[in-house]
Amino acid sequence: MKQLIFLLLIIFPFCISAQSAGLNNGSLNNGDCFEIDWKKDIILDSCRTAPFKIIAMNIEEDCLIIKVQYGGGCGDTNFKLLFDGVVTESLWPSLQLFLAMDDQDSCRALLVKELKFDLHCFKGFVTENGLNISIINHDKSINYQP
């Protein structure tokens, strides 16, 4: 039990810093798609984020497009898509991502934003059935077939 608490104390602040220390919506990688932030020493289930809602998800030209709705309007709001490096290999391989929002905005206007993240780095995991990508903190998933 002490080891688990120690591990969480190390990892939980890392999740928080991953949300707040990053660049605005990731690092530009491919056109207008942003890089997915790989954090191999992270437990995605332990991460926390400001509240928001995923309205829609789709994939266009190897970009995962996530439409989000959140409260704001007068300050900075940054999003990061976190990946722990774990891919479950099977007939239908899958991976989990965590969409983190760092909200430095105290206003409450209802805003909608489209986020785009580059999926090229996952092409090597795709089988003939595709690759199932889940956003675990919103119970959303999509099948990637480049």
Image (tube, rainbow, N blue to C red):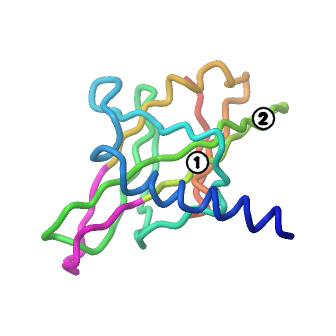
Compared to residue 61, the image places residue 71 above or below, namely: below
Residue type, mark 1 in image? Leu
**What residue is at 57 percent from the left and 53 percent from the top?**
135
Residues packed near mark 2 inside 10 Å, few (<14), some (14 to 19) or many (20 plus) = some
Tell me where residue 142 sits by quadrant. top right
Q: In the rendered image, which residue does mark 1 sit on? A: 97
Compared to residue 11, the image places residue 35 above or below, namely: above
Distance between the alpha carbons at the discs numbered 2 and 1: 17 Å
**What residue is at 30 percent from the left and 31 percent from the top?**
28
Query: Which stretch is magenta?
Result: 101-114
In the image: residue 113, left or right of residue 8? left
Q: Which mark is residue 22?
A: none
Q: Position of residue 122 (x, y in %)?
A: 59, 26
Q: In the rendered image, which residue does mark 2 sit on? A: 92
In the image: residue 18, left or right of residue 33? right
**Between residues 127 and 83, which one lies in front from this camera angle?**
83
Q: Position of residue 6 (x, y in %)?
A: 73, 63
**Closer mark to the observer between disc 2 and disc 1:** 1
**What residue is at 69 percent from the left and 24 percent from the top?**
125
In the image: residue 104, left or right of residue 68? left
SS category of the residue bearing label 2: loop
- 145 magenta-colored: no
Query: Sequence order check: which comes first, mark 2 or mark 1?
Result: 2
Residues packed near mark 1 inside 10 Å, few (<14), some (14 to 19) or many (20 plus) = many
- 105 magenta-colored: yes
Name the quarter where the N terminus is drawn: bottom right
Name the quarter where the C terminus is drawn: top right
Q: Position of residue 10 (x, y in %)?
A: 63, 57
SS category of the residue bearing label 1: strand
Tell me where residue 72 sits by quadrant. bottom left
